[in-house]
Amino acid sequence: MKTYIQNGYVIDPASRTEGKMDILIEDGKILKIGSDFAKEELKAQVEMGKLQVIDATGLVVAPGLVDVHSHFRDPGFTYKEDIESGSRSAAAGGYTSIVLMANTKPTVDSLETLQYVLDKGAETNIHIHTCCSVTMGLKGQQLTDMESLKAAGAVGFTDDGVPLLEEGLVRTAMEKVAALNVPISFHEENPAFIENNGVNRGKASAFYGIGGSDRQAEIDLVGRDLQIALETGAHIDIQHISTKEAVELVRQAKKKGDHIHAEACPHHFALNEEAVIEHGTLAKMNPPLREEADRLAIIEGLKDGTIDLIATDHAPHSAEEKAKAITEAPSGIIGLETALPIGITYLVETGNLDMMTLLEKLTVNPAKLYHLDAGYLAEGGPADLVIFDPKATYVAGNYASKSTNTPFTGMEFKGLVRYTICNGQVVFKRG
C-alpha cells in the first residue's frame, strides 16, 4: 500500500530545502515530493484501499533520526535492554537508524558476535548497524581484525566505555580505519585524573564527599587523539564531549582537517553538575555533567559547527543498579526517546539553533560519517521519516525502553513525535 503524507512542513537538511510539501511513498521508497499531486487520482486510490493518508497539518516532516551512539546491551545484559526493546525505544523517539556500541558480553570483537547483532537487528522494524571494538575484549592491548569485521558489516570501530591509553596502538588503529574508510570513535577519559567516575570534580563531588572526575581526564586524551588523527587522516568522532577545553581543541583541529568530528549528548547541553546533586545516580554518567560554563560552551560548539553530531549515548540500567550508592551505581542514562524534545527545547526554542541545523546534526551528519543510506529526503531515496509537532508538549516518561534511568522523567519539553516511518511502514504512532 502507498502512503501519502499531506500538508506537512518538510525539512531536509541534506538538500537544505524546507517548505509545505506532500510526500508519496511506495515500496519503501519516496516516490514523489512536491505540491503538484493529482489529488483526484489519490482520492480514488484511497477509496480502493490502495493508499493510506497521513495528515501532517501543523507538523514537521523530516528524515528519520540517526543515532551513532547507542547501547542496546545485547548480548549479555538483556535485563537492561535488548535489540528488540531498544528498537522500540528508538522508533518512539523518531529514530530509524541506530549504530550500536560494542561493549556487550561478549564484546562485538568477532565475526560470530557481529553476525548475532546484525541478525537480531534485521528482525526489528528499523535499521540496526553496529560498531565493532577496536581492541579484543576492550582490553586495550590487541587490535581486532578490522578488515574482516568491516567486510562482514561493521560500520565503524570504538572501545566506547573504555579509554584507549596506549598511544602506539591508537595510532595503528587510526591508520587502519583510514585505509578502510570507516570512522573510529573515542571515549576520552584518562583514569589518571579520575578518583570516582560519573561525578564532576568540583561542586558535585564535594557534595558527595568523593574525588570525582577531573576535567583534565577528557582534555588530556582529546588533545592526543586529535593530533594523531590530523597526522593519519582518520575520520574520528570525539564522543560525548563534556568540557569547554575539549570543545576548543576540536574547534582548532577542525580548521586543519574536515575528518575531525565531535558529538554532544542532550544531557550535556541541557544539564550541569547541579543535576547530579538533585537527582543522584539518575544523573551519573561518563563523562559527567560538568559546570554551567561547559554546558554553554557545548551549545556554542553546536552553533558554530565545531560539534557536528548530536548522539544520545542511550545507556540503559536497571532500577536496582541505579539504586546503589553514588560510588557504586553504574553510569549512564537512557536518551533515545527524549533527544529530539530536549534539542528543540534547549536549542531551537532558545534561539541557539534553527530547526534545520538541529535536524542536520540528528540526521544527515551522522549518516554521512558512517556512510549510511539515511538522513535525507529525496525521490527514490529511503522512506525513513519522522513526523513531529514542534510546539506540542512532551512529558518524559512511559518509556518503550526496558529501563527508566534518566533525570528527565516528568520534565516538560517542546516537541512531540507523532509518527516514525521506516522502510515506508509506520513503526510508531502517537495519537
Image (tube, helix red, strand yellow):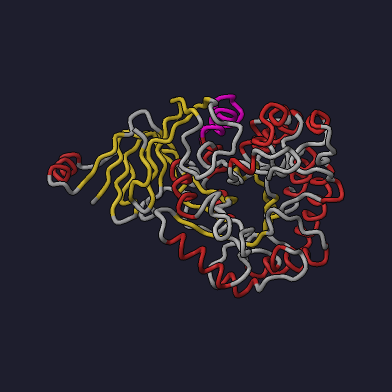
Residue 80 in sight in this render: yes
Q: Residue at x 75, y 71 (%)?
A: 142
| Front residue of 149 and 58 | 149
Residue at image x 43%, y 61%? Answer: 122
Query: What range is drawn magenta here?
Result: 341-355
Q: Position of residue 258 (x, y in %)?
A: 68, 53
What count of labels does the image hold? 0
Residue 321 or residue 19, whichever sits in front: 321
- Splitting the image into 4 quarters, where does residue 294 fall? top right
| Residue visible at 67% across and 33% down in the picture | 299
- In the rendered image of this protein, does residue 6 appear above or below residue 78? above
- In the picture, measured across the screen, residue 368 lies left or right of residue 139, that is left
Classify residue 279 as left or right of residue 75: right
Looking at the picture, how far across and down is residue 329, in whole percent?
69, 42
* Residue furthest out toward the right: 192
Q: Main secondary structure of the magenta part?
A: helix
Residue 268 seen by the camera:
no
- For image coordinates 77% across by 63% down, the residue present is 170
Give residue 78's quadrant in the image: bottom right
* Position of residue 138 measured from the top left corner of the image (x, y, whole percent): 71, 62
Residue 206 among those drawn in magenta: no
Query: Is 129 positioned to the left or the right of 159 in the image?
Result: left
Figure quadrant of the C terminus: top left
Image location (x, y in percent) of residue 145: 66, 74
> In the image, is residue 351 part of the stretch drawn in magenta?
yes
